[in-house]
Image (cartoon, helix red, strand yellow):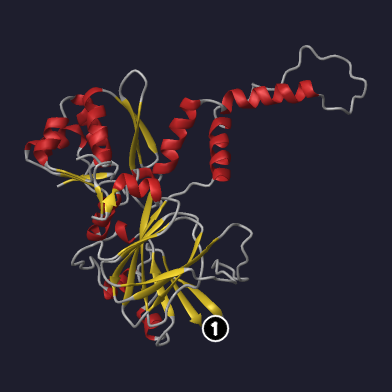
Amino acid sequence: MTTADASFFGVMPVERFLAEYWQKKPLFIKGAFKDFVSPIEPDELAGLALEDDVESRIVIENGKTPWELRHGPFSEKTFKGLPKDKWTLLVQGVDLWVPEVAALVDDFRFIPNWRIDDIMISYAADGGGVGPHYDTYDVFLLQAHGRRRWDIGQLCEAATPILDHPALRILTEFDATDGWDCEPGDLLYLPPRLAHFGVAQGNDCMTISVGFRAPGVGSMIREFAESIAERVPEEVRYEDPDLAVQANPGEITPAAVERIRTLVMQRLDDPDSLAAWFGKHVTEPKYDYFPSPADAPLGPDGVRRALADGADLRRNEGSRFAYQERTGGGIRLFVDGEGFLCAGAAADLGRLLCAETFIEADRLRETVRDGAALGLLAQLHDRGSLHLD
């Protein structure tokens, strides 16, 4: 069954969801995850917030200031000192630390891998929330514990009024148009810029947020232009061998501007360079410490032995894989911000690595058919992007 033929949580074909709802309107699915059991408990989430390498925040509605924001890592003393109600703990990138949480992403792979960002999980005491707000990206909200009331409102834009807050984008006005009481297993999809407000109904409310990358156009222009500029030799400069006397030496003539435009655009308007840059850009790990090099590098010989011993392959939860087909055959594989040109068996391996997060030993051995594929597998293992178990 292809992705296009797949069911969207049993309520409609995936193609219909993408055509009618994705980036267009919200959708609530009661019991999308049947008999759902959370892959992480509230105490475990709080434990992650104690770690230095984990990004976490606490929002207290009535703290030292309205909507007080605190940044982790926290201590057990922090949690003991919190009020009885109206506070929320938010932990980013939980999928990087808990494999069972990372497995939830597989249910959303009808969206291209490069669009998937991370899984954030929030825990809230009774009445807890982060205020009415909007996001600039798509998000699926899966209720994991307890109950949360979600209300949705108006579509927002950059000029939509927000509170004067140093970090939180809380709306000054929220006009609720619809809402749902979410229980474990319920799923709510929200498109970008739609105002929403979630409030915990009772204690032990935990919500799993699967967010998606939406690269900013301004940052893409800036970063792509910088990557091109780095490759232009210093000797390449503006030239005007046909310069003529001007009536006014202070004028920047249309001819001069056209020369500048040509010099810039002939380098920026390069589809192949843009494709190569974009693949690296969107597979860069969100956090600097993922991936980390393998403790025991194997090299090609070690990988060959591991395959002979029946090793399965598992992708690092913090790694990002994507590829592009190349004109004339083969692929350009992107892994954690690096590009690899692959052909033959190595290209087949690259496609498989992008499609699956876990590959059983027999299938892996069938795909690694030559030295190029073996070398690619060894390189990705030793840099920490995947594991052989």
Residue drawn at x 25%, y 40% is: 355
Q: Quadrant of the N terminus?
A: top left
User: Furthest-bottom residue in view?
Assistant: 84
Question: Quick check: 167 left or right of 313?
Answer: right
Mark 1 crowdedness (10 Å alpha carbons): few <14, some 14-19, many ≥20: few
Residue 352, visible in the rendered structure: yes
Helix, strand or loop under label 1: loop
Q: Is residue 149 above or below residue 339?
A: below
User: Residue 297 in the image: x percent, y percent?
Assistant: 22, 42
Q: Is residue 87 above or below residue 239?
A: below
Residue drawn at x 53%, y 47% is: 216
Tag 1: amino acid: Lys
- Viewer-proximal residue, 134 or 348? 134
User: Furthest-top residue in view?
Assistant: 242
Residue 129, picture quadrant: bottom left
Question: Quick check: 373 left or right of 283?
Answer: left
Q: Is residue 199 above or below residue 136?
A: below
Residue 143, picture quadrant: bottom left
Q: Which residue is mark 1?
A: 64
Residue 363, picture quadrant: top left
